Image (tube, grey):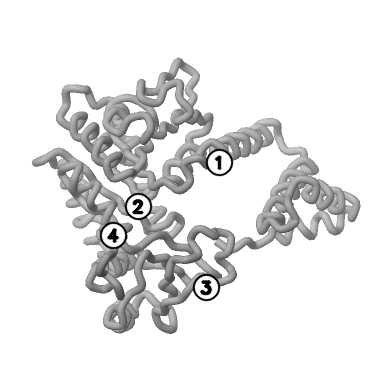
Amino acid sequence: MPFEPDDYLSRHFKTSGAELSKKIDELVALVVPSSSQNLPLYREMLVTVMRMAQADRSRWDAKILLQTMREMEHAFSRLDQFKRRRKVTVFGSARTPIEHPLYALARGLGETLARYDLMVITGAGGGIMSAAHEGAGMDNSLGLNITLPFEQHANPTVDGTDHLLSFHFFFVRKLFFIKEADALVLCPGGFGTLDETLEVLTLVQTGKSPLVPIVLLDEPGGTFWKDALDFMRRQLEGNRYILPTDMRLMRLVDNAEDAAEEIDHFYSNFHSSRWLQDRFVMRMNHVLNDAAMSYMNKHFADLCLKGRFEQQACCEMELDEPELQPLPRLSFVFNGRDHGRLRELIDFINAREHWASPLGAED
């Protein structure tokens, strides 16, 4: 998202004294390279803290802000070593016993995802979480644990390793479950699993989180997610609480291989996306051919607020990610609403017959 400074905070410091504003500028200059595109962001962070200090908020408010900033900075630092690895967040019940078929399914899922060179993120607990990490192994696992007043142990795969992070606040932990995920696999579970499922769908549906594969995994013949999808179609789609295309944000599978293939196919051409002012840019691994572009401009025109789909090279506003500069881009003025339809577009560009140079491309 583009950076927009908080004019209210800026005005406050302009009127309350130029000296304080000057001191903040000096402090930022001491630690931030002048060439950094993040310099105005760091300055705004300091202004926000100073504004809170001037208001002298309650001790509880101050402790919340401090703990949140500490946890986030620590997580950013620890996770930087895994920055360019694709990761899959797996949700499911911590109460799933080891002898249950779902435990074996989750263990097979972890093993399969690792074979596809995908890391497995879980809450580091037992049940489905332990099984997925067991299958993936420590090198391919990340555990995001929660610190509780009573004794809390991480599962044996990540316990005591630098692949385990502990959080004090649930909301910060939930942020990293989604922020770090290139895909999500949801196994049957209780209130917590359903909470994560609906939150993930809401974030993707509203565009607050990037579009990623959302896979519902159940054992063969299982009805957990089938019944949930029936409810959504009957009550949510049937009453027009959601768009019909919103149901396409999820895919139901009953084995680990199909789950991994769904994720792998999602990134066969589509790489990632970002907003550049009013344009939505999708980075791709392969240029699209003329026939594909013509089809898109006719059959996916409803996704464009105005104009057409265009292919382009990296522009100046994307120079903050130099490793992605060689990738071709698909750019358009997205309506920002129908993300289920956007998923259909991604499926279209992932079809090999729509690439300009499919021969010799990697699977």
Return the mark for residue 201. Answer: 2
Q: Residues within 10 Å of mark 1 (few under 14, many from 20)?
A: few
Quick one: label 3 or label 1, which is nearer the N terminus? 1
Instruction: Answer whether residue 243 is visible to the viewer in this image.
Output: no
Q: How many marks?
A: 4
- Contact check, label 4 and label 3, Cβ < 8 Å: no
Q: Which residue is mark 3?
A: 278
Quick one: label 4 or label 3, which is nearer the N terminus? 3
Tell me the kind of residue under disc 4. Glu
How far is disc 4 from disc 1 in space, using C-alphas?
32 Å
Name of the residue lying farthest toward the front: 360
Pair 4/1: label in front = 4
Quick one: label 2 or label 1, which is nearer the N terminus? 1
**Quadrant of the rendered image containing residue 125:** top left
Tell me the kind of residue under disc 3. Asp
How far is disc 4 from disc 2 in space, using C-alphas?
31 Å
Q: Which residue is mark 1?
A: 76
Element under label 3?
loop
